[in-house]
Image: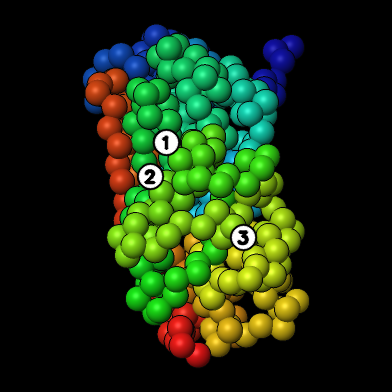
Amino acid sequence: MPQTRTGAPTISDVAKAAGVGRATAARTLGGYGYVSPQMQAKVLEAAEDLGYRTNALARSMSTGVTHTLGVIVADVGNSFFSGVLRGIADTARMHSIDTLVISTDESREKEISAINALINKRVDGIIISTAARTLAAAGHIAQARDQGIPVILVDRALPGLGLDEVVIDNRAAARDAIRCLIQAGHRRIAFVWGPPAPSRPTLRRELVDAASDNLFTESERLEGYLDALDDEGIPFDPELIMTGEKTSEHAREEMLRMFDLPAAPTAVFCTESDAVIGALRAIRERGLRIPEDISLIGFDDNPWAEVMNPPLSMIAQPMHELGVQAAQRLLDRIENGQGEPERITLTTQLIHRESVATFNQGA
């Protein structure tokens, strides 16, 4: 007695039903080689009737294309990276491309493992917001590049690596924020997140050198802070710079230390959301009021900033657009190959709310 077939339909089944050769069915369903429109129509109709599903792994092995992008970010739970991921996924979806996302928790070791995993999964390209601070620490990224895998850096640049970068103008964003505070009369402006120096730099050159070990975003924001002080002839005071580990608790401790200075800060610029949270805790702990006693501007506009009392002035980053631009650039590289690396720089917006007040120096 003939056995009844119970398995999933194969390419051979589709070819038989369409009345074509197996090679013709394979080319049509695999998306490679030439097949006449008439034959394509027959094969696709037969595949639909039989409920045939393409074996993506087999197709990728025959074509070298998986229609998958790899994305590596520092913290998938961070609202900034969530916004960037949404832009990447939306763009990829428009091109019928899937995304694989890996979060590294700012760990270089996890980032190396992530790169290797994506290479092994044969992704067509990689978008990465790297935890590497120097070219010497980015060998794993160079390895992917040297294997011919298109790689795009998003949010965090590594000049000299020879890759496309999609970033914001961090330096200009910080400079605009500090200028806003200076125009309101503030001269003692705290900078909360600074370089991870083991001891507090006492000279500006030492500070800049220590900041060179920071992520691209952090060092650029510090440069913008210093630019604004220079523009107005305001002396640099290292005591107003937070150093050490980057946590909300350490930001709180550093703000409390600054409040005990003989000339305490009258304003604070926070370069990350966690820095804002730490500063707010210190301000509340000392019983100070925003903006009557101290003004504040933060980085990364979040929904909670608008509903605070008072609403906080924040720098808004084009998170979704960063993702869109990174994905579009990667798709272009996949389609057209490598060329001279480019940096795409997007602008930010300073959202003025109610956390900045005029400071009367004679009061």
Q: For the residue labelled by badge 3, is the local secondary structure a helix, a strand or a loop?
A: helix
Mark 3: amino acid: Ala
Mark 2: amino acid: Val
Dot in front, 1 or 3: 3
Residue lying at 30% horizontally and 14% vertically, measured from the top left = 33
Against 10, is 210 above or below? below
Which residue occupies the foreground of this view, 326 or 132? 132
- Determine crowd level at label 2: few under 14, some 14-19, many 20+ residues with C-alpha closer than 10 A: many
Question: Gap between marks 2 and 1, in whole Å?
Answer: 7 Å
Which residue occupies the foreground of this view, 123 or 346? 346
Counting from the top left corner in percent of width and height, residue 64 is at 43, 15
Q: Is residue 129 left or right of residue 20?
A: right
Counting from the top left corner in percent of width and height, residue 229 is at 38, 60
Q: How is the image coloured?
A: rainbow
Residue behind mark 3: 275
Q: For the residue labelled by badge 1, is the local secondary structure a helix, a strand or a loop?
A: loop
Residue contact at pointers 2 and 1, CB within 8 angstroms: yes
Q: For the residue labelled by badge 2, is the local secondary structure a helix, a strand or a loop?
A: strand
Task: Tell me which numbered mark, 1 or 3, is placed earlier along the sequence.
Answer: 1
Residue behind mark 2: 167
Counting from the top left corner in percent of width and height, residue 202 is at 56, 47
Residue lying at 34% horizontally and 31% vertically, measured from the top left = 164
Mark 1: amino acid: Ala
Residue behind mark 1: 157
Residue lying at 63% horizontally and 46% vertically, measured from the top left = 200
